[in-house]
Amino acid sequence: MRLQKYMAKCGVASRRKSEKMIDDGLVSVNEKIVTRQGINVDPDKDVVRVNKKIIKLEENKIYIMLNKPLGYVTTTDDERNRKIIIDLIEGVKERIYPVGRLDMDTSGLILLTNDGNVTNKITHPRNEVIKKYIAIVEGTPNKSELTKFRKGIMIDGKKTSPASIKIVKNYENESILEIEINEGRNRQVRKMCEAINHPIKKLKRVSIGEIDIGGLQFGEWRYLDDEEMKYILSL
Ligand code: URA
């Protein structure tokens, strides 16, 4: 099996992201770092490590939602010894991975699974899964700024796809916005708000597609229920 496919099946990340991890020198096969794409591995014989940890095909598929508190990173390992979200999930023996990412200074909904297919479905831009955020920003966007945001903004040299933005409440110096995007670019919501001159003070993700954070408290997690699983598997 191709290495990147094996990594995705183990739930590490989508195939595309796995290729990037190979490029970045994070993957070894039988104790040798592999940076060449396209090599084959035998899941029964070869020992594959990502970030120095052995990965394995899991029989038992796990699907979890977590309300990420501020100050945690969503990587599975952190060289700088920052707090990682995996440490919040106690009592699960399977190795699970976050679906996509949230910045250290963003809170809210993040899914974790060992099902690489599901990770792929949720994160692949083709599926256009909508992620909803509540943001507190400086000032209040005016009509033309809102229009600009909705139509798409150049960030990092590429235009964002159409997005939704609503003012929930505005105060003298700040406002609360509801924002929906269907992409997952690096610090995308922050960059979009900066681009219309309303920097983010606080950001929380409240839903991913039909999965809503509901009453989950910061740091709490639970397994997805039947309805949520039905949605996930229908993607
Ligand atoms: N957009 C951001 O800017 N940060 C996040 O964590 C998620 C989306």
Image (spheres, rainbow, N blue to C red):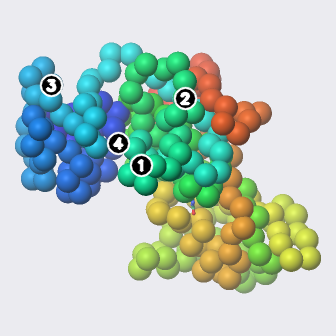
Give neighbour class at mark 2: few <14, some 14-19, many 20+ (Cα, 10 Å).
some
Give neighbour class at mark 4: few <14, some 14-19, many 20+ (Cα, 10 Å).
many
Task: Compare marks 3 and 1 and give the one earlier in the sequence.
Answer: 3
Disc marking residue 89: 2
Residue picked out by circle 1: 78
Dots 4 and 3: beta carbons under 8 Å?
no
Disc marking residue 189: none
Residue 150 makes an appearance in the image:
yes
Q: Nearer the viewer, mark 3 or mark 1?
A: 1
Give the CA distance from mark 2 to mark 4. 18 Å
**Which residue corresponds to the image point at 52% horizontal and 18% vertical from the top-left?**
91
Q: Amino acid at mark 1?
A: Asp
Task: Compare marks 2 and 3 and give the one earlier in the sequence.
Answer: 3
**Which residue corresponds to the image point at 20% horizontal and 45% vertical from the top-left?**
27
SS for callout 4: loop
Ligand 1 lies under 8 Å from the Cβ of mark 3: no
Expressed as whole percent of the image width and height from the top left, the position of residue 219 reads 66, 36
Give neighbour class at mark 1: few <14, some 14-19, many 20+ (Cα, 10 Å).
few
Q: Amino acid at mark 2?
A: Ile
